[in-house]
Amino acid sequence: MAGRIEDYALIGDMQTAALVCRDGTADWLCLPRFDSHAVFAGLLGTEEHGFWRLGPARAEGTEPASADRRRYRGDSLILESEWDTPRGTVRVTDF
């Protein structure tokens, strides 16, 4: 299920872009260009529309955790997301 729009961050490379939710899910991505068909379109409402998630492991039957910290690196669209877990910190860099 898609997140709230304010929970998304934009990443891109001037050819295409993706919307990444606080739980590490890429819910919107068109490849190889902005005007191409969507590869991931979970933003439209259901998991059947497709998504990709990268973040800490979660127990079966539980919702993925939201990142404890997120920031863009400098003046770029490179997004760093961090989750604190009992075993340490997980950092994912999306670009």
Image (spheres, rainbow, N blue to C red):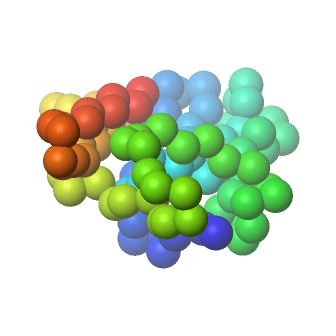
Residue 39: quadrant of the picture: top right
Residue at 60% in and 26% down: 15
Residue at 75% in and 67% down: 46
Q: Percent x, y for residue 84?
A: 18, 48
Rendered view: 34 above or below 33: below
Q: Percent x, y for residue 80?
A: 27, 37
Q: Residue furthest front?
A: 60
Residue 23: quadrant of the picture: bottom left
**Residue 70 visible, this angle:** no
Residue at 73% in and 25% down: 32
Rendered view: 12 above or below 58: above
Q: Percent x, y for residue 35?
A: 77, 39
Specify whether 2 is left or right of 78: right
**Residue 55 visible, this angle:** yes
Residue at 71% in and 39% down: 30
In this rendered view, identify the residue nearer to me: 41 or 92: 92
Specify whether 20 is left or right of 16: left
From the image, which quarter does the N terminus lie in? bottom right
In this rendered view, identify the residue nearer to me: 18 or 69: 69
Q: Percent x, y for residue 6?
A: 40, 70
From the image, which quarter does the C terminus lie in? top left
Total numbered badges shown on the rendered structure:
0
